[in-house]
Amino acid sequence: MKLNNLNDLFLHELKDLYNAEHQITKALPKMMEQASSDKLRSAFEMHLEETKSQIERLEKVFDILGEKASGEKCKAMEGIIREASDMMSEDADPAVMDAALIASAQRVEHYEIAGYGTLCTFAKQLGIDGEAIGLLESILSEEKDTDMKLTQIAESSVNTKAEK
């Protein structure tokens, strides 16, 4: 795909995040299996359902734009998930593994926050349909909420247990 203008870049980034969300739906069940903290496992389960909903909203954005919903291989997410997978193969105390899982999950969230923030900015600049912008903003808000929830779990229990 040749990037001739901001709209081309917007579509490229949209496809990147669409692929990233699909990768996340495959990674989260593995992270749930590894989590020993009930709160963490529950947060991952909730985010998996949220991610499936986000994929549906991205498909609606593609539809609004008159584009076919398709993914552009997200190599960054592939790398982040590979690192998480490598970490999960380590011989770690369960509490330490939970801390590592949170660290990996927050890397995912931070990538998504950056990506969706950029998409929202591009969409506004391009004058894209308000409904599409609203859908992207709702996903961005959920990603920020998930990041905060992971921080709360880490700070309220997981990191203290991992420290001991």
Image (cartoon, rainbow, N blue to C red):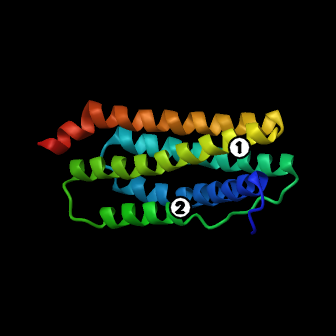
Q: Earlier in the sequence, mark 2 or mark 1?
A: 2
Q: Residue at x 31, y 43 (%)?
A: 37
Q: Looking at the picture, does residue 151 appear above or below residue 110?
A: above
Type of the residue with mark 2: Lys
For residue 161, the mark is none
Q: Secondary structure at mark 2?
A: helix
Number of labelled discs?
2
Q: CA distance from mark 2 to mark 1?
A: 28 Å
Quadrant in which the N terminus is drawn: bottom right
Q: Is residue 152 left or right of residue 147?
A: left
Nearest to the observer: residue 102 or residue 9:
9
Q: Secondary structure at mark 1?
A: helix
Q: List x then y, in percent, for residue 31.
A: 40, 55
For residue 26, the mark is 2
Q: Residue furthest right?
A: 66
Q: List x then y, in percent, for residue 115.
A: 58, 48
Q: Is residue 9 left or right of residue 68?
A: left
Nearest to the observer: residue 144 or residue 156:
144
Tag nearer the camera, 2 or 1:
1
Rendered image quadrant of residue 152:
top left
Q: Looking at the picture, does residue 39 appear above or below residue 32?
A: above
For residue 122, the mark is 1
Q: Residue at x 22, y 50 (%)?
A: 96
